[in-house]
Amino acid sequence: MPKTFAEKVHAVVTQIPRGEVRTYSEVAKLAGNEKAARAVGNILNKNRNPKVPCHRVIRSDGQIGGFAFGGEQKIEKLRGEGVVIKKDMIQI
């Protein structure tokens, strides 16, 4: 059972299905603090656990947002899961 906010964020992100995305704000809300979207980004930027698919978390405006291993790798991973991206924007 996750206790810290970071553990809750990792638990939420782990549940995002392949080929789907959630926003930093959505993850923050699901982890228990709807005002902590920026904290979610910071937590995920430090993640090195491949079981936590942080590449599936995007900005609320549809832009891909950051990724510890670089934006191109994030785009590549998302496209590999079937997510449509045009001009660094997620097409929903």
Image: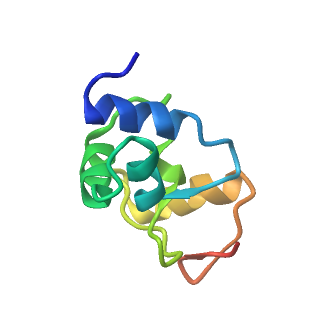
Q: Quadrant of the C terminus?
A: bottom right
**Residue 27 in the image, given as x and y percentages of width and height:** 45, 50
Whether residue 35 is visible: yes
**Residue at the image point whose x is 68% and y is 43% from the top:** 18
Q: Quadrant of the N terminus?
A: top left
Left or right position of 90 against 68: right
**Residue 7 in the image, given as x and y percentages of width and height:** 33, 28
- Residue situated furthest bottom in the rendering: 87
Left or right position of 9 against 62: left
**Residue 48 in the image, given as x and y percentages of width and height:** 34, 34
- Residue situated furthest right in the rendering: 82
**Residue at the image point whose x is 41% and y is 58% from the top:** 24
**Residue at the image point whose x is 38% and y is 38% from the top:** 9
Given residues 34 and 38, the one toward you in this image is 34
Left or right position of 61 against 67: right
**Residue at the image point whose x is 25% and y is 42% from the top:** 46
- The type of colouring in the image is rainbow
Give the quadrant of residue 35.
Answer: bottom left
